[in-house]
Image (cartoon, grey):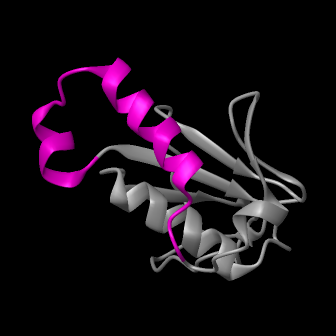
């Protein structure tokens, strides 16, 4: 279950990392168990770094935006995922030049915004 947000926008299609209760996955591929990933809280996760480096290698030449801002990645994590685990995943992404990081959340409707005018 994703956390809720009233913010608008969409996530990147390039790469999605799913942080579940038991596994961290890229697509359908299980990368590492959560119990192993939390052994060094807040630190990069070597096996995830290897997978990200492999993705970059297969991708090839970076475009101008990616060179300046880093590669795009979306992290989907259950609302119960500990912050230290998300911090480790984000640190790993940043280390491998995935600096355009989005966190996926469930979008909820916020309060209606009053519009001015004469009716």
Instruction: Give the image location of residue 46, x and y in percent.
Output: 53, 54
Residue at (30% x, 51% y) in the render: 97
Task: Using the rendered view, name the quadrant where residue 17 is placed.
Answer: top right
Is 60 one of the magenta-colored residues? Answer: yes
Please report the bounds of the magenta region as a residue range.
43-70
Res. 99 visible in picture? no
Instruction: Give the image location of residue 6, x and y in percent.
Output: 66, 70
Task: Using the rendered view, name the quadrant where residue 16 is placed.
Answer: top right
Res. 41 visible in picture? yes
Q: Main secondary structure of the magenta part?
A: helix
Q: Is residue 80 left or right of residue 11?
A: right
Instruction: Give the image location of residue 80, x and y in percent.
Output: 86, 74
Instruction: Give the image location of residue 82, x and y in percent.
Output: 76, 78
- Where 43 falls versus 93 (above or below)? below
Please tell me which residue lies in front, 60 or 39.
39
Residue at (37% x, 60% y) in the render: 94
* Quadrant holding the C terminus: bottom right
Q: Is residue 97 left or right of residue 45?
A: left
């Amino acid at each position: 279950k994703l956390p809720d947000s009233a913010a608008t926008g969409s996530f990147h299609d390039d790469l999605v990392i799913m942080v579940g209760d038991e596994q961290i996955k890229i697509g359908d591929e299980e990368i590492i168990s959560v119990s192993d990933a939390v052994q060094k809280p807040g630190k990069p996760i070597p096996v995830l770094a290897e997978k990200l480096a492999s993705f970059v290698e297969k991708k090839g030449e970076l475009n101008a935006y990616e060179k300046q801002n880093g590669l795009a990645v979306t992290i989907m994590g259950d609302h119960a995922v500990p912050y230290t685990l998300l911090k480790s995943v984000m640190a790993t992404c940043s280390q491998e030049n995935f600096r355009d990081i989005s966190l996926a959340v469930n979008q909820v409707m916020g309060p209606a915004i009053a519009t001015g005018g004469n009716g």
